[in-house]
Amino acid sequence: MRIWEKGERLLEAKSISVYYGSVKAIEDVSFSVNAGEIVAMIGPNGAGKSTALKAVFGMVDIRSGDMLFNNKSIKSLRPDEHVSEGISLVPEGRHLFPSMTVIENLEIGAFQQKNSSAKEEMEKVLNLFPLLKDKKNHKAGSLSTGEQQLVALGRALMQKPKLILADEPSLGLSPSYVDIIFDKLIEINKSGTSVLLVEQNARMALEIAHRGYVFKIGSIFMEDTGENLLKSEEVKRAFLGG
């Protein structure tokens, strides 16, 4: 298994453009994630953040530019092939199987793992999320939205990814579960997994991010460390109520 050095370039989007039919979603957008980083994407609704994330995961066609992961072009790969490369997605809205148990939903995340490895990852996930261990045999549909988000995050971890893509993970959650989700993202990152985070809660996203990109209708108009973006007067006015 490859040993990743902290700070090594893991993901690089090079001048990518994505269209929905004839409608431009993002154009000439470049961003990157280094090994060991949390990188946040913030901006108004419809600015292209989630489209950029979908482009990373092969859910939309990249019309021009390239997407590199581990210095290899992945822009023509299917989502399941992205999983094989070491990328997992926590989708907006969670997309669990409500009639299946927590354990069964987690097992789906290990569809490419051998049984012995899947059992090992299951143990790690349940130890990371004690709340889920207590409800592992409950149907996912019976859980609160916060608990369901933990299942979605756990499912993404079952493949031992190098990079997790988290699309609006705090959406619709109570304040206490928002705190839990962000704490878990930090914990996951400290264990060695990089995180690319799309999030409407700009303040919390930038507080945990090493770097951030600010989108404005189909393009990126600002990038800096999370700390510097929090101090930016323009970011404060637009997203932080300053």
Image (cartoon, rainbow, N blue to C red):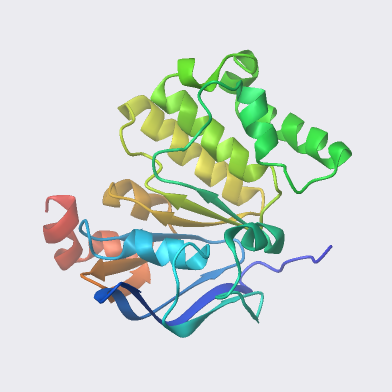
The quarter of the picture where residue 23 lies is: bottom left
Q: Residue furthest front?
A: 21
Q: Residue furthest right?
A: 116
Q: At x 34% / y 51%, what residue is drawn?
A: 199
The correct choice, above or below, for 143 with respect to 223 in the image is: above
* Any part of residue 46 in sight: yes
The quarter of the picture where residue 181 lies is: top left
Residue 232 as seen in the image, left or right of residue 81 = left
The correct choice, above or below, for 155 with respect to 132 in the image is: below
Rendering coords of residue 20 (x, y %): 31, 69
Q: At x 45% / y 85%, what residue is drawn?
A: 65
Rendering coords of residue 115 (x, y %): 85, 37
- The residue nearer to you, when weighing 26 against 40, is 26
Numbered-mark total? 0
Give the quarter of the figure containing the N terminus.
Answer: bottom right
Rendering coords of residue 219 (x, y %): 27, 76
- The residue nearer to you, when weighing 80 against 116, is 80
The correct choice, above or below, for 74 with respect to 233 in the image is: below
The quarter of the picture where residue 43 lies is: bottom left
* Any part of residue 211 in sight: no
Q: At x 66% / y 79%, what residue is drawn?
A: 72
- The residue nearer to you, when weighing 209 against 215, is 215
The correct choice, above or below, for 154 with respect to 98 in the image is: below
Q: At x 39% / y 67%, what residue is drawn?
A: 52
- The residue nearer to you, when weighing 89 against 236, is 89
Rendering coords of residue 204 (x, y %): 33, 46
